Amino acid sequence: MIVSVLAGLAAACSGGNPPAAATTAEPAAAATPAPASSAPQVDAALQAAIAGDWRDPENRARDAARHPRETLEFFGIRPDMAVVEIWPAAGWYTEILAPYLRDHGRYIAAHWDPEAKQEFFRKGVQGFRDKLAARPDVYGKAEVVVLALPDKTEMVAPESVDMVVTFRNIHNWMASGKAPEMFAAMYRVLKPGGVLGVVEHRAATDQPQDPKAKSGYVRQDFATALAEQAGFVFEAASEVNANPRDSKDYPGGVWTLPPTLREGDKDREKYLAIGESDRFTLRFRKPGSVAGVGEGAAPVSDEEPSPPSP
């Protein structure tokens, strides 16, 4: 079934430019607006988290390319929300989200399996946990749960979080043939009316979508179809992370560009001048009432999650 879904989506994205999609759509249910008087405080809290001195200097240097404030504001984040970040890797966004949500909300990192066969995943999630443990004053309330297919997808209780976000991960799921299952897992944990925020390297529309996304680029219409197949309703798109200089045709895929610079010194200045990739930024909503959004999430059990074995 999953193979047929992927094949159908790839076929739909296999030729020519698709009809231009509107950047906004009617949401399944209108979100309850925050009181006007609270907006400056929310902005100030987010800006304070972005400016935090606990952030890695190399991560802060990339703010001009990744636009965290504009991206999170587009998603509609508030400090009283329960938010799951899917596969946060080394924690670029964790440095912002965890302290932002610490006092009034809940931050849950759905990360790799510490018992995975691949050393990359085991070391990666341990490094992430070490990062959190080094600053309990900043990350002490952050939670880490496992999200690994096929059988570790529970994360938190169904329909219990206000927002799910994921950054530059869809190509990873496509590479393993698990993108539909990942979107289904994200859908399950969101409350009705909850938001899914997605950022991904954007592929050109005049080329067919590689089902495995080996270049790291994903067509925007392909990602939208994956989300809609899971039940999400497209709400809006932002060009905040767009980069028209990105030609998307590099020998080493998207990793040719900064920050990876896979080609080393070869054409280094050229790739630095291009900058980080062209990315789409999309907001989806789970259909249903938004009553209760912002009231936190129920854990899977009453027990505090235990750290994994090293």
Image (cartoon, helix red, strand yellow):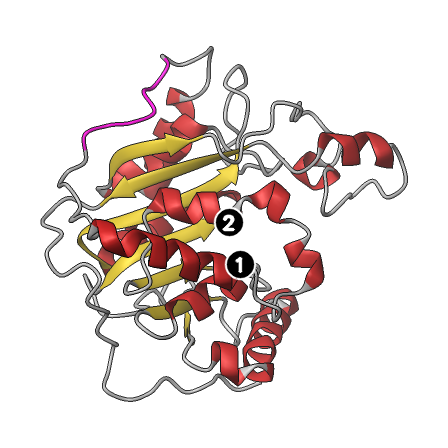
Disc number placed over residue 254 in the picture, else none = none
Give x and y (percent) for residue 105. Answer: 31, 69
Give x and y (percent) for residue 310. Answer: 58, 85
User: Residue at the spot x=54%, y=65% of the render?
Assistant: 95
| CA gap, disc 1 and disc 2 | 8 Å
Magenta-drawn stretch contains 285: no
Confirm whether residue 27 shows in the render: yes
Q: Quadrant of the N terminus?
A: top left
Q: How many marks?
A: 2
Confirm whether residue 180 shows in the render: no
Disc 2: which residue: 68
61 or 145, which lies in front?
61
Q: What is the chief secondary structure element of the magenta stretch?
A: loop
180 or 125, which lies in front?
125
Disc number placed over residue 50 in the picture, else none = 1
Magenta-drawn stretch contains 21: yes
Q: Which residues are magenta?
A: 20-26
Q: Give SS at disc 1.
A: helix
Quarter-wise, where is residue 146 in the image? bottom left
User: Disc 1 residue type?
Assistant: Ile
Q: Residues within 10 Å of mark 2 (few under 14, many from 20)?
A: many
**59 left or right of 297 in image:** right
Up the image or down, 265 lies above or below 309; here it is above
Up the image or down, 180 lies above or below 13; here it is below
- CB atoms of marks 1 and 2 within 8 Å: yes
